[in-house]
């Protein structure tokens, strides 16, 4: 009996050239078993790969059964050599075995110390198993080194969301960079494209693999092999032995080129067993297929595979004939659809330029760099903006994979089931009300879960207005109703993460990227409610950016109160809100600068809308309790009050807002009634327009008019002015006056009426004074109660007793 | 033309000033040269980007910036498409075009300066009227434009400030660029471009609205945008060098404090231009002005003059603050707000910028 023939096909993960070479080699070899680098637990899932409904990009997902946050992904694109091998085996009806370490053990091992997010190029290159190896594991435990037992790499929940990065780790050997450097080429990516990916397949389909294996063998002589790789290779050798024992005659092994030399020579079985004995105990894991996206493949961190141009690779793989010409046509189509005038002549010129560039740079064929340079110069008028579109839509691409229904359930679903059990919240189709007391741990957890699900678009619980009290911050009332389609939503949400927390974080981060200022403040509020500490910094960063660029003071003015409200919630829930405070203060500062300009030239509707905003901002700034901002805001109000129109109503701040500013300053005790009276006098003097003056009065008086009673001089001024208004103007003023006085409290209105009716107001009332002496004893008796109500320790008697709270 | 006379001129043409480098490159250049090119495209790119030749000749970099830009520009000229260099003022468009022409054709003087009054004769041909009246239309009476000469001789012609040229004159370029021919109906003849002919045009992309290129003309060009300096250090170096040269020609002495203020001016310009602070943490609004390197140079030069003639002989924050505000605040309403936000939000809290903050507040109050 002759020995089984083992053919090692060393590939670059996700290299279209490698994929094509693998397809050719497999077709020539006709192996009776195909061994692929990957977790052996997935062997039973390989049948799904052959199904019609399975559309790459997809990923194998392995997660620890009772801790879905610890998960690893093995992404496959159509141009991945491993995928080609899977499909070939399925078509040829031969078995496929995955031969890497079991996922249960590689997850227990933790992340490979040498794989670093800080060095993305290394990950995307040749061997770099980062692509189809637990390098894409969700944990960010850069501290976990090889040999550490499972317990030492306790991972922070949800830290593996896209964007979560690990600390720097030493860069692994990058064999491609080494080879490129040896060939005198500074750019390893371009070099690899030139010598491997762009090569037309030769006569002997196995020749490229032999050459590559030779190069890797030399490289490995000069570079230490990581312990982890040694163990993995031992596992692979064991699997090859098992395949031989099973009686297979022609065995094809598809693995990273880096491993080929180690698999070519078989050491003793005992040697490999000794290596494998070092492995930690296997964790119980579950595996499934999940849909993947090109965008996800292109990410360097989190679950990404670090391929910069999946769309381009896909194109190269699927279009062997005239790839550049077809690529340029695709670009032209895209640009035309976006209303860029691109003609066939442009396409021709772009191809010519790309070819010429390749010659000039000494490359055999134009690569992605050349084609993009040509597209920029010919089709995009040199602009990077249109090129960004090409990059987004074609170089990366929108491809979204599909997974057949038969694939096992996603871990997010399991996590939710687990949480529902732990929090004793059963999904029921009937609607019921749930009142939560956030001071209790269980209820607080429940509230977080419901908020997180809401972020994911699962409105299982909807917040309802509390029937008991509406202003409490530690009570929440929800209406629970489980809809069947939420299961589907859950599968969709699976792309954001493997746990509810992780997915909500991922979704929030992704939403933040596109949200507008107002939506962002809401999102920040949501992040706090749902307790997503990892998403908050990103949302805050976006918020700060948007606030900086937003030129509309109105947006800032709506955003600030919401943000301050969020701060108060944060206080109640003991969240760290220092970042939030910084953003709120920044926002307030910008508002102080932008507001005066934004208040000029407003019509009546605009002014009244702005007035509401100013009131809200005023309250928010008081809540911020930041003295510097308080001062600045007072300065802004003073500036507002002083900006009188000179030549026509459009040239200054409308009377309504100036009056309001004076009122707010007066309420804060920054000016006294005498000053307010002086200003009222100025506005009511003959020089200013009666309409403007009426607006001013509205701004000053509305929302609490008792001060007119306490300072009869003000009322007197008003009365005198009103009596002096000409009859025809009075008709114009009437609506404003009506509005102003109807907003006053009934009692105040009555008293004002009776005072005015009593006769001349100018002096008489002042002289009269209070009827009796102030009884100090009786007055003091009320202070403890007042202090209790106001929540202050030391009774402070407000300057103006008529002021309404807030 | 002897060497003595050329060194007398105020500014030499690129092909004369760098004649030795060009000769050295030509000696070592064994790559394929397009017809009538003095150098291969690779050597032209090396001439602009700098490098060292096999015999140790150092080629000084003429352009400091991304390699890609020059490679695309040179390659474009090697195809039969014309090259359009776009960029805000002060991004070395003219400089690059002059050196490209010098390296490719050995002659950078075939130049049409685009102005609002550029006549069609400057693009096509004119007539020597004495000859015309005496002998009637003839080849001798024809006064060729630089473009016509470049077509005849297979050389690179340059058109400066293309977007300033009136639209009807721009249109006469279309035939030249697409048909590569220039008909002379008066003589019933035409001038056909020989191989090696091409056109480098420059345009300021802030002035797009002046005489926007028609899409027919635009289609004849490959566009390369020359970016602003990529790093703070690069820009500080450019500003320092230019300020030194300008200062000498204005007889301004070198003042202490210069280096620090230059860095500050460049930092402010870069931050406002990019809409992002240097540490990448805070976004700021962008004012409507260009804030080009050239403007930074003039702000510093102004500051130097102020400090020399009216100040205490040290370049201080107050001397440049005025100039900066002048450069930033082009639109009195919107830009002033941008500037105030920047001063209050960024400058105020920056270490060691107290003096500048005070000066900026004083000026913009």
Image (cartoon, rainbow, N blue to C red):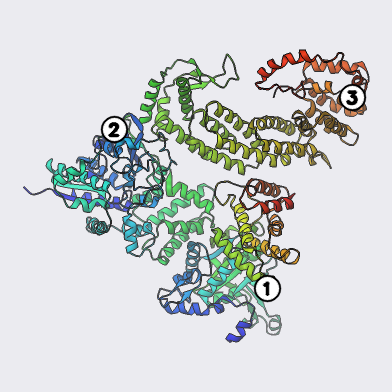
Residue under label 2: A285
Residue beneath disc 1: B249
Query: Are the residues at dot 3 and dot 1 in contact (C-beta closer than 8 Å)?
Result: no
Mark 2 or 3, nearer chain start: 2
Q: Which residue is mark 3?
A: A716
Q: Quadrant of the C terminus of chain A?
A: top right
Which chain does the residue under circle 3 lie in? A
Tell me the element at label 2: strand
- Give neighbour class at mark 2: few <14, some 14-19, many 20+ (Cα, 10 Å): many
Q: Please state the horizontal and vertical placement of residue B200, each as a whole percent of the image.
A: 56, 68
Camera-side residue of A779 and B66: A779
Give the camera-side residue of A396 and A789.
A789
Give residue A321's quadrant in the image.
bottom left
Verify CB contact (< 8 Å) between mark 1 and mark 2: no
> Gap in Å between the C-alphas at discs 1 and 2?
77 Å
User: Residue A299: where, in percent of width, then height?
Assistant: 41, 45
Whether residue B94 can be seen here: yes
State whether residue B52 is above or below residue A92: below
**x and y percent of residue A504 in the render?**
45, 32
Task: Please tell me how crowded label 3 is: few (under 14), some (14-19), or many (20+) other residues with Cα within 10 Å.
Answer: some
Which residue is at a point 47% across and 15% down the rendered structure image? Answer: A431
Judged left or right of residue A208, residue B353 is: right
Give whichever of A791, B192 is nearer the camera: A791
The chain letter for the residue carrying disc 2 is A
Q: Position of residue A542 (x, y in %)?
A: 54, 40
Seen in the image, is A732 located left or right of residue B41? Answer: right
Count of numbered marks: 3
At horizontal 58% and vertical 49% (from top left) the residue drawn is: B276
Which type of secondary structure does the marked residue at label 1 adopt?
helix
Q: Secondary structure at mark 3?
A: helix
Rounded to the nearest angstrom, the CA distance separating label 3 from label 1 is 72 Å
């Amino acid at each position: 009996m002759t020995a089984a023939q083992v053919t090692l096909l060393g590939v670059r993960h996700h290299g279209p050239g490698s994929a094509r070479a693998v397809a050719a080699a497999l077709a020539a070899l006709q192996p009776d078993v195909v061994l692929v680098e990957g977790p052996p637990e997935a062997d039973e899932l390989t049948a799904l790969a052959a199904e019609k409904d399975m559309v790459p990009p997809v990923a194998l997902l392995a997660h620890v059964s009772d801790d879905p946050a610890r998960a690893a992904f093995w992404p496959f694109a159509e141009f991945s050599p491993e995928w080609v091998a899977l499909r070939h085996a399925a078509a040829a009806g031969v078995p496929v075995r995955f031969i890497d370490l079991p996922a249960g053990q590689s997850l227990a091992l933790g992340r490979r110390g040498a794989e670093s997010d800080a060095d993305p190029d290394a990950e995307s290159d040749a061997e770099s198993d980062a692509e189809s190896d637990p390098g894409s594991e969700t944990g960010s435990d850069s501290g976990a080194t090889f040999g550490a037992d499972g317990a030492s790499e306790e991972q922070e929940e949800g830290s593996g969301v896209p964007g979560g990065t690990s600390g720097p780790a030493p860069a692994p050997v990058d064999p491609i960079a080494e080879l490129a450097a040896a060939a005198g080429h500074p750019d390893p990516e371009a070099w690899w494209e030139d010598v491997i990916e762009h090569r037309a397949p030769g006569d002997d389909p196995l020749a490229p693999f032999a050459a590559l294996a030779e190069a890797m063998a030399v490289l490995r002589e000069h570079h230490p092999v990581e312990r982890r790789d040694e163990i993995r290779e031992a596992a692979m050798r064991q699997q090859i032995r098992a395949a031989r024992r099973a009686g297979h005659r022609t065995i094809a092994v598809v693995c990273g080129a880096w491993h080929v030399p180690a698999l070519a020579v078989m050491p003793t079985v005992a040697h490999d067993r000794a290596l494998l004995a070092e492995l930690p105990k296997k964790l119980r894991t579950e595996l499934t297929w999940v849909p993947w996206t090109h965008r996800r493949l292109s990410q360097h961190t989190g679950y990404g595979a670090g391929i910069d141009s999946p769309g381009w690779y896909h194109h190269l793989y699927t279009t062997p004939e005239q790839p550049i010409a077809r690529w340029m046509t695709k670009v032209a189509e895209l640009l035309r659809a976006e209303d860029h005038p691109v003609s066939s002549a442009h396409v021709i010129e772009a191809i010519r330029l790309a070819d010429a560039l390749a010659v000039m740079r000494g490359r055999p064929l134009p690569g992605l760099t050349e084609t993009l340079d040509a597209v920029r110069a010919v089709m995009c008028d040199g602009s990077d903006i249109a090129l960004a579109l090409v990059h987004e839509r074609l170089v990366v691409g929108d491809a979204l994979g599909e997974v057949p229904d038969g694939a096992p359930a996603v871990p997010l679903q399991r996590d939710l089931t687990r949480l529902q059990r732990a929090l004793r919240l059963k999904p029921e189709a009937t609607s019921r009300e749930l009142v939560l007391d956030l001071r209790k741990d269980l209820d607080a957890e429940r509230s977080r879960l419901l908020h997180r699900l809401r972020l994911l678009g699962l409105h299982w619980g909807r917040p309802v207005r509390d029937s008991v009290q509406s202003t409490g911050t530690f009570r929440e009332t929800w209406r629970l109703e489980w809809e069947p389609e939420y299961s589907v939503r859950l599968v969709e949400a699976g792309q954001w993460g493997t746990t509810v927390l992780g997915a909500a974080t991922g979704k929030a981060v992704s939403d933040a990227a596109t949200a507008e200022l107002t939506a962002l403040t809401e999102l920040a509020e949501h992040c706090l409610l749902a307790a997503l500490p990892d998403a908050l910094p990103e949302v805050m960063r976006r918020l700060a950016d948007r606030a900086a660029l937003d030129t509309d003071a109105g947006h800032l003015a709506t955003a600030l109160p919401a943000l301050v409200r969020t701060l108060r919630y944060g206080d109640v829930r003991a969240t760290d809100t220092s970042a939030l405070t910084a953003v709120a203060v920044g926002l307030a500062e910008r508002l102080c600068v932008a507001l005066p300009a934004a208040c000029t030239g407003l019509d009546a509707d605009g002014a009244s809308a702005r007035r509401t905003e100013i009131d809200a901002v005023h309250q928010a700034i008081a809540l911020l309790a930041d003295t510097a901002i308080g001062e600045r805001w007072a300065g802004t109000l003073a500036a507002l009050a002083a900006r009188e129109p000179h030549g026509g109503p459009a040239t200054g701040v409308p009377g309504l807002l100036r009056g309001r500013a004076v009122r707010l300053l007066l309420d804060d005790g920054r000016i006294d009634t005498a000053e307010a009276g002086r200003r009222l006098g100025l506005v009511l003097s003959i020089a200013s327009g009666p309409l403007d003056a009426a607006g001013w009065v509205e701004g000053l008086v509305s929302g609490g008019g008792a001060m007119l009673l306490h300072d009869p001089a003000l009322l007197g001024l008003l009365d005198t002015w009103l009596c002096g208004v000409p009859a025809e103007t009075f008709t114009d003023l009437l609506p404003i006056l009506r509005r102003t006085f109807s907003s006053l409290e009934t009692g105040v209105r009555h008293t004002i009426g009776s005072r005015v009716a009593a006769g001349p107001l100018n002096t008489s009332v002042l002289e009269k004074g209070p009827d009796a002496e102030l009884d100090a004893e009786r007055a003091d008796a009320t202070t403890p109660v007042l202090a209790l109500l106001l929540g202050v320790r030391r009774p402070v008697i407000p300057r103006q007793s008529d002021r309404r709270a807030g | 033309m002897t060497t003595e006379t050329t060194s007398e001129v105020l500014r030499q043409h690129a092909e004369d000033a760098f004649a030795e480098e060009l000769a050295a490159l030509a000696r070592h250049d064994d790559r394929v040269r397009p017809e009538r090119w003095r150098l291969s495209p690779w050597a032209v790119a090396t001439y602009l980007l700098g490098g060292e030749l096999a015999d140790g000749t150092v080629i000084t970099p003429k352009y400091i910036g991304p390699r890609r830009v020059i490679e695309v520009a040179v390659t474009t000229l090697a195809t039969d498409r014309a090259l359009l260099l776009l960029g805000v003022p002060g991004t070395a468009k003219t400089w690059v075009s002059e050196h490209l022409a010098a390296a490719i054709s050995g002659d950078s003087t075939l130049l049409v300066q685009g102005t609002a009054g550029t006549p069609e004769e400057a693009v096509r041909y004119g007539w020597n009227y004495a000859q015309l009246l005496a002998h009637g239309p003839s080849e001798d009476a024809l006064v060729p434009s630089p473009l016509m000469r470049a077509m005849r001789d297979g050389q690179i012609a340059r058109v400066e400030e293309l977007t300033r040229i009136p639209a009807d004159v721009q249109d006469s370029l279309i035939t030249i660029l697409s048909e590569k021919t220039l008909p002379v109906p008066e003589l019933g003849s035409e001038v056909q471009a020989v191989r090696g002919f091409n056109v480098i045009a420059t345009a300021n992309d802030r002035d797009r609205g002046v005489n926007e290129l028609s899409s027919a003309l635009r289609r004849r060009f490959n566009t390369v945008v020359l970016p602003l300096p990529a790093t703070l250090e690069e820009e500080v170096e450019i500003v320092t060098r230019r300020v030194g040269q300008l200062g000498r020609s204005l007889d301004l002495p070198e003042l202490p404090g210069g280096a620090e203020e230059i860095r500050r001016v460049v930092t402010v310009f870069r931050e406002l231009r990019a809409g992002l602070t240097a540490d990448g943490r805070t976004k700021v609004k962008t004012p409507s002005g260009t804030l080009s390197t050239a403007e930074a140079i003039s702000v510093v030069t102004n500051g130097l003059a102020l400090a020399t003639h009216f100040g205490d002989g040290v370049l201080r924050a107050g001397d440049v603050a005025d100039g900066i505000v002048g450069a930033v605040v082009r639109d009195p309403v919107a830009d002033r707000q941008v500037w105030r936000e920047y001063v209050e939000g960024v400058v105020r809290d920056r270490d060691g910028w107290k003096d500048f903050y005070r000066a900026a507040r004083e000026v913009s109050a």
